[in-house]
Amino acid sequence: MIEIENITKRFSEKIAVDRLSLTVPSGEFFAFVSPNGAGKTTTIKVIVGLLRADEGTVRICGQDIQKNAVAAKALLSHIPDQPYLYDKLTGREFLEFVARMHRIEPEKARRKVEELSDVLGLRDYLDDLAEGYSHGMKQRVVIASAILHEPKVIVVDEPMVGLDPRSVRVVKDLLRDLSQSGATIFMSTHTLNVAEELAGRIGIIDRGRMVAVGTADELRRASGGAKGLEESFLRLTAGEE
Amino acid sequence: MTVAARLMTLAWVRAKTLRNSLRVLRRQSSLKIFVILFFAIGLWGGLYFIFLDGFRFLGRGPLEDFRDTIVQILFAVFFLSLFIMLTFSNAIIAYGSLFRSEETAFLFARPFSPWQIFAYKLSETLLFSSWAFLFLALPLIVAYGVSGRSPWYFYPGAAAFFGVFAVIPAAVGGGVTLLIARFLPRFAAENAGTFSGDRRRAGGGGLGGRVPSAP
């Protein structure tokens, strides 16, 4: 569960996030869409504890991300848009590192790595150094590392960027399965059809403010009967792009 | 998970990357490795014999009575110069390591406390900045020991001294970097506020936030 209460984040005079409040209950798949520069990435960085809000609080399964940062971060996973791996580690060693930091039993970690290798198609390159990976290969390893410790909350920033169509399908199925098994998924994306396909609710943020939250149908109604999510988005964020 | 266990996990990843780097190096051209080793050993050996000749020169003729005083002054100047250079070197490397590194941001989203990440990064800075110091200082101290016919325990004792000596400029350099990030946050950019304790820049709590390059 993610509880965001009235968070505000400023950069000098610019307000990146403006009194944003939102609760994403356990097991919900929530998508977050916005025009460029509207505060989406800043919000994600506040949620995962990379940035501290000037005002307001974020709780992950009841743990304050700033006051109990280590406990909160043990419950969540962050999949950034730019995957980071250690160039001089193999994919398998990177996953072992993540398993160690989350104190997963070595045997359980090995089983889980094998399982995820099959699901995400990592087997062909998992024992190569990451310096030779493409963006898509890195992204798949990072996704594997993010779900290795079975987090209760997964925050995903543009997960489909750089993935081939088959991998996109695999990642979508994986995220949907995780959500159905009780994990809270908070996904930021520019791809509206992905948001509509996967998410139970969609939030639209514009100029740092949450302008609409709801199911795709609710957003259509809120935008005055738009035909699809794209039109709803354009109407609700009119004047921005 | 205890602090020691978390630091061990970070040390484990560094050991793995070092081992893999050495493996990659072994697969590279033998000529390249030979040339690097040849010049490194040549430089080390050259320095050793220059220092040895210098100490022997001081130990004979009219300078013999002043040898200890001169050596004391030489060592003081040498180590003071190295200390200043190492402080700058550590500050520059710590800046890159703490405030410009993608790894720091990666670790911050994981269950590590800021102080654990800082300790890990400081030890990395110490290793990166101090290997050249050891490379330059070892021939000097070995030549001094040989010229003075020092007992065997002089050498491990000197090595321990170097280890302790290298920590001081690393800590000063790390401190200087934090002060720069604290008072000149725009200069420090990426992770400023995270380590520096700048409440305004980090957004309120010092050791806990990360400032991105753009909102």
Image (cartoon, coloured by chain):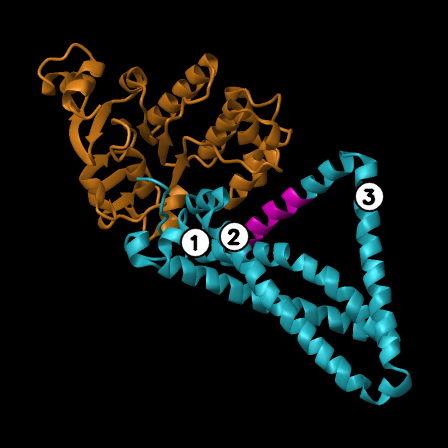
Chain colours: A orange, B cyan
To which chain does the residue with label 1 belong? B
Q: Residue at x 60, y 32 (%)?
A: A131
- Above-or-below relation of B53 to A236: below
* Image quadrant in which the N terminus of chain A is located: top left
**Callouts 2 and 3 in the same chain:** yes
How far apart are the two marked residues, 2 and 1, measured between alpha carbons? 9 Å
Q: Earlier in the sequence, mark 2 or mark 3?
A: 2
Q: Which residue is mark 1?
A: B113
Residue B170 is marked as none
Taking the image as shown, residue B145 lies to the left or right of residue B11, namely: right
Task: Give the residues drawn in magenta, as a range.
Answer: B4-18
Residue A91 % position (x, y): 58, 32
User: Are the residues flagged by discs 2 and 1 in contact, CB closer than 8 Å?
Assistant: yes
Which element type, helix, strand or loop, lies under badge 1? loop
* The quarter of the displayed image where residue B156 is located: bottom right
Select label 2 or label 3 by which is in front. 3
Assess disc 2: are there few (<14), some (14-19) or many (≥20) residues with their C-alpha within 10 Å of its C-alpha: many
Q: Residue at x 36, y 21 (%)?
A: A176
Q: Earlier in the sequence, mark 2 or mark 1?
A: 2
Residue B35 is marked as 3
To which chain does the residue with label 2 belong? B
